[in-house]
Amino acid sequence: MKIAKIRPAEIGFDFDGVIADTVEAFIRIACEQYGHCGIRPEDITDFSVEQCLDMDAGLAESIFLQILHDSVGTGLLPMPGAVAVLDDLTGHGQVTIVTARPDAEPVHHWLHTVFPAQARRRIRVVAMGDHDDKARHIKDLGLSTFVDDRAETCLQLRQAGIRSIVFAQPWNQGRHDLPTVRSWDDIRALCL
Protein backbone atom coordinates (compact mmCIF):
# COMPACT_ATOMS: atom_id res chain seq x y z
CA MET A 1 0.00 0.00 0.00
CA LYS A 2 1.55 3.29 -1.08
CA ILE A 3 -0.30 6.21 0.45
CA ALA A 4 1.30 9.50 1.47
CA LYS A 5 1.21 10.30 5.20
CA ILE A 6 -2.15 11.71 6.26
CA ARG A 7 -2.54 14.42 8.88
CA PRO A 8 -4.81 13.18 11.69
CA ALA A 9 -7.11 16.20 11.31
CA GLU A 10 -7.71 15.32 7.64
CA ILE A 11 -8.78 11.70 8.09
CA GLY A 12 -12.18 10.48 9.20
CA PHE A 13 -13.34 7.10 10.39
CA ASP A 14 -16.51 5.08 10.25
CA PHE A 15 -17.59 3.77 13.64
CA ASP A 16 -19.13 0.29 13.31
CA GLY A 17 -16.71 -2.24 11.86
CA VAL A 18 -13.75 0.16 12.00
CA ILE A 19 -13.56 1.56 15.54
CA ALA A 20 -16.14 -0.68 17.21
CA ASP A 21 -16.23 -4.46 16.77
CA THR A 22 -19.90 -4.62 15.88
CA VAL A 23 -19.57 -8.10 14.40
CA GLU A 24 -18.35 -9.55 17.69
CA ALA A 25 -21.36 -8.01 19.46
CA PHE A 26 -23.76 -9.22 16.75
CA ILE A 27 -22.44 -12.79 16.89
CA ARG A 28 -22.48 -12.88 20.70
CA ILE A 29 -26.04 -11.48 20.97
CA ALA A 30 -27.29 -13.80 18.21
CA CYS A 31 -26.05 -16.78 20.20
CA GLU A 32 -26.77 -15.69 23.77
CA GLN A 33 -30.22 -14.21 23.21
CA TYR A 34 -31.55 -15.99 20.13
CA GLY A 35 -29.78 -19.37 19.99
CA HIS A 36 -28.08 -18.65 16.66
CA CYS A 37 -24.71 -20.03 17.72
CA GLY A 38 -21.76 -21.06 15.57
CA ILE A 39 -21.62 -17.90 13.45
CA ARG A 40 -18.04 -16.86 12.73
CA PRO A 41 -16.90 -13.43 11.51
CA GLU A 42 -15.72 -14.98 8.23
CA ASP A 43 -19.28 -16.24 7.63
CA ILE A 44 -20.43 -12.64 7.25
CA THR A 45 -19.48 -12.14 3.63
CA ASP A 46 -22.11 -9.53 2.82
CA PHE A 47 -22.84 -6.20 4.50
CA SER A 48 -26.50 -7.29 4.60
CA VAL A 49 -26.02 -10.25 6.93
CA GLU A 50 -29.32 -11.86 5.99
CA GLN A 51 -27.81 -12.43 2.52
CA CYS A 52 -25.10 -14.71 3.88
CA LEU A 53 -26.47 -16.12 7.15
CA ASP A 54 -29.39 -18.44 7.75
CA MET A 55 -31.16 -15.75 9.74
CA ASP A 56 -34.39 -13.85 9.30
CA ALA A 57 -33.83 -10.24 8.18
CA GLY A 58 -36.07 -8.99 11.00
CA LEU A 59 -34.00 -10.79 13.64
CA ALA A 60 -30.74 -9.46 12.19
CA GLU A 61 -32.18 -5.94 12.19
CA SER A 62 -33.37 -6.34 15.77
CA ILE A 63 -29.87 -7.33 16.93
CA PHE A 64 -28.25 -4.42 15.08
CA LEU A 65 -30.81 -1.97 16.51
CA GLN A 66 -30.05 -3.24 19.99
CA ILE A 67 -26.34 -2.50 19.41
CA LEU A 68 -27.06 0.90 17.83
CA HIS A 69 -29.32 2.08 20.65
CA ASP A 70 -27.32 0.67 23.59
CA SER A 71 -23.71 0.18 22.56
CA VAL A 72 -22.51 0.13 26.17
CA GLY A 73 -25.24 -2.18 27.45
CA THR A 74 -24.65 -4.69 24.66
CA GLY A 75 -20.95 -4.88 25.55
CA LEU A 76 -19.72 -3.45 22.24
CA LEU A 77 -15.93 -3.75 22.19
CA PRO A 78 -13.37 -1.62 20.39
CA MET A 79 -11.50 -3.12 17.46
CA PRO A 80 -8.03 -4.29 18.54
CA GLY A 81 -5.69 -1.31 18.65
CA ALA A 82 -8.36 1.32 17.94
CA VAL A 83 -8.26 2.99 21.36
CA ALA A 84 -4.47 3.28 21.50
CA VAL A 85 -4.12 4.60 17.94
CA LEU A 86 -6.99 7.06 18.21
CA ASP A 87 -5.64 8.26 21.55
CA ASP A 88 -2.30 8.92 19.82
CA LEU A 89 -3.99 10.63 16.87
CA THR A 90 -5.91 12.99 19.14
CA GLY A 91 -2.54 14.17 20.44
CA HIS A 92 -1.90 15.58 16.96
CA GLY A 93 -5.32 17.05 16.18
CA GLN A 94 -9.04 16.51 16.21
CA VAL A 95 -10.24 13.10 15.07
CA THR A 96 -13.56 12.79 13.25
CA ILE A 97 -16.00 9.89 13.23
CA VAL A 98 -18.74 9.96 10.60
CA THR A 99 -21.26 7.22 11.23
CA ALA A 100 -24.34 6.11 9.34
CA ARG A 101 -26.02 5.71 12.73
CA PRO A 102 -28.98 8.07 13.10
CA ASP A 103 -28.09 9.16 16.65
CA ALA A 104 -24.67 10.20 17.99
CA GLU A 105 -25.56 9.84 21.68
CA PRO A 106 -24.92 6.05 21.96
CA VAL A 107 -21.54 6.61 20.27
CA HIS A 108 -20.65 9.41 22.69
CA HIS A 109 -21.72 7.25 25.63
CA TRP A 110 -19.59 4.36 24.33
CA LEU A 111 -16.58 6.63 23.75
CA HIS A 112 -16.94 7.85 27.34
CA THR A 113 -16.54 4.27 28.61
CA VAL A 114 -13.50 3.28 26.53
CA PHE A 115 -11.44 6.44 25.84
CA PRO A 116 -9.48 8.67 28.19
CA ALA A 117 -11.09 12.08 28.81
CA GLN A 118 -8.32 13.97 27.02
CA ALA A 119 -8.84 11.93 23.84
CA ARG A 120 -12.66 12.19 24.02
CA ARG A 121 -12.45 15.98 24.00
CA ARG A 122 -10.68 15.82 20.63
CA ILE A 123 -13.06 13.34 18.96
CA ARG A 124 -15.88 14.79 16.89
CA VAL A 125 -18.84 12.50 16.10
CA VAL A 126 -21.20 13.13 13.20
CA ALA A 127 -24.21 10.80 13.00
CA MET A 128 -25.78 11.24 9.61
CA GLY A 129 -28.18 8.33 9.39
CA ASP A 130 -27.44 7.19 5.83
CA HIS A 131 -24.67 5.01 4.38
CA ASP A 132 -25.05 6.68 0.99
CA ASP A 133 -24.72 10.33 2.06
CA LYS A 134 -21.31 10.29 3.73
CA ALA A 135 -19.50 12.13 0.93
CA ARG A 136 -21.40 15.36 1.54
CA HIS A 137 -20.68 15.29 5.27
CA ILE A 138 -17.03 14.36 4.82
CA LYS A 139 -16.51 17.23 2.37
CA ASP A 140 -18.34 19.68 4.67
CA LEU A 141 -16.03 18.63 7.50
CA GLY A 142 -12.94 19.35 5.39
CA LEU A 143 -11.64 15.79 5.47
CA SER A 144 -9.53 14.51 2.59
CA THR A 145 -9.46 10.82 3.53
CA PHE A 146 -11.92 8.37 5.04
CA VAL A 147 -11.64 4.81 6.39
CA ASP A 148 -14.76 2.65 6.15
CA ASP A 149 -15.52 -1.07 6.18
CA ARG A 150 -18.33 -0.79 3.63
CA ALA A 151 -16.76 -1.09 0.17
CA GLU A 152 -19.77 0.55 -1.50
CA THR A 153 -19.32 3.63 0.66
CA CYS A 154 -15.62 3.81 -0.18
CA LEU A 155 -16.36 3.55 -3.90
CA GLN A 156 -18.92 6.39 -3.61
CA LEU A 157 -16.37 8.50 -1.75
CA ARG A 158 -13.75 7.90 -4.43
CA GLN A 159 -16.24 9.07 -7.08
CA ALA A 160 -16.76 12.23 -5.01
CA GLY A 161 -13.02 12.91 -4.97
CA ILE A 162 -12.36 11.74 -1.41
CA ARG A 163 -9.44 9.40 -0.80
CA SER A 164 -11.05 6.29 0.63
CA ILE A 165 -9.41 3.41 2.41
CA VAL A 166 -11.21 0.13 3.08
CA PHE A 167 -10.87 -1.40 6.53
CA ALA A 168 -10.59 -5.10 5.63
CA GLN A 169 -13.49 -7.22 6.76
CA PRO A 170 -14.92 -10.47 5.33
CA TRP A 171 -17.88 -8.58 3.79
CA ASN A 172 -15.72 -6.30 1.65
CA GLN A 173 -13.30 -8.82 0.17
CA GLY A 174 -13.17 -8.88 -3.63
CA ARG A 175 -15.60 -5.95 -3.95
CA HIS A 176 -13.16 -3.11 -4.67
CA ASP A 177 -9.76 -2.06 -5.97
CA LEU A 178 -9.10 0.53 -3.27
CA PRO A 179 -6.25 0.81 -0.76
CA THR A 180 -6.90 -1.40 2.26
CA VAL A 181 -5.83 -1.44 5.88
CA ARG A 182 -6.02 -4.64 7.88
CA SER A 183 -5.45 -3.28 11.36
CA TRP A 184 -5.13 -0.15 13.45
CA ASP A 185 -1.35 -0.60 13.22
CA ASP A 186 -1.75 -0.01 9.46
CA ILE A 187 -3.71 3.17 10.22
CA ARG A 188 -1.03 4.31 12.66
CA ALA A 189 1.58 3.87 9.91
CA LEU A 190 -0.48 6.07 7.57
CA CYS A 191 -0.87 8.92 10.04
CA LEU A 192 2.01 8.99 12.51
Image: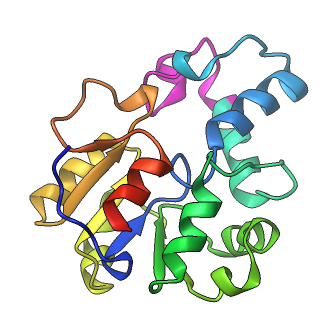
What secondary structure do most residues of the magenta stretch adopt?
A: loop
Identify the residue at image location x=41%, y=45%. 149
Residue range in magenta is 44-59
Whether 49 is among the magenta residues is yes
Q: Is residue 125 visible?
A: no
Identify the residue at image location x=79%, y=30%. 28
Q: Who is closer to the viewer here, 145 or 43? A: 145
Whether 19 is among the magenta residues is no
Is residue 153 shown above or below 124?
above
Could you say where residue 116 lies in the image, as x and y percent from the top left? 75, 77
Could you say where residue 43 lies in the image, as x and y percent from the top left? 54, 15
Q: Quadrant of the N terminus?
A: top left
Q: Who is closer to the viewer here, 122 or 71? A: 122
Judge from the rendering whether residue 128 lies leftward or rightward of residue 109; answer left or right.
Answer: left
Q: Who is closer to the viewer here, 71 or 18? A: 18
Identify the residue at image location x=83%, y=48%. 75
Kindly indicate the quadrant of the structure image that contains residue 4.
bottom left
Could you say where residue 51 lies in the image, as x and y percent from the top left? 47, 20
Q: Who is closer to the viewer here, 124 or 67? A: 124
Q: Quadrant of the C terminus?
A: bottom left
Kindly indicate the quadrant of the structure image that contains residue 188.
bottom left
The colour scheme of the drawn protein is rainbow
Is residue 13 shown above or below 92?
above
Is residue 131 shown above or below 137?
above
Kindly indicate the quadrant of the structure image that contains residue 73.
bottom right
Could you say where residue 7 lies in the image, as x and y percent from the top left? 31, 77
Q: Is residue 33 visible?
A: yes
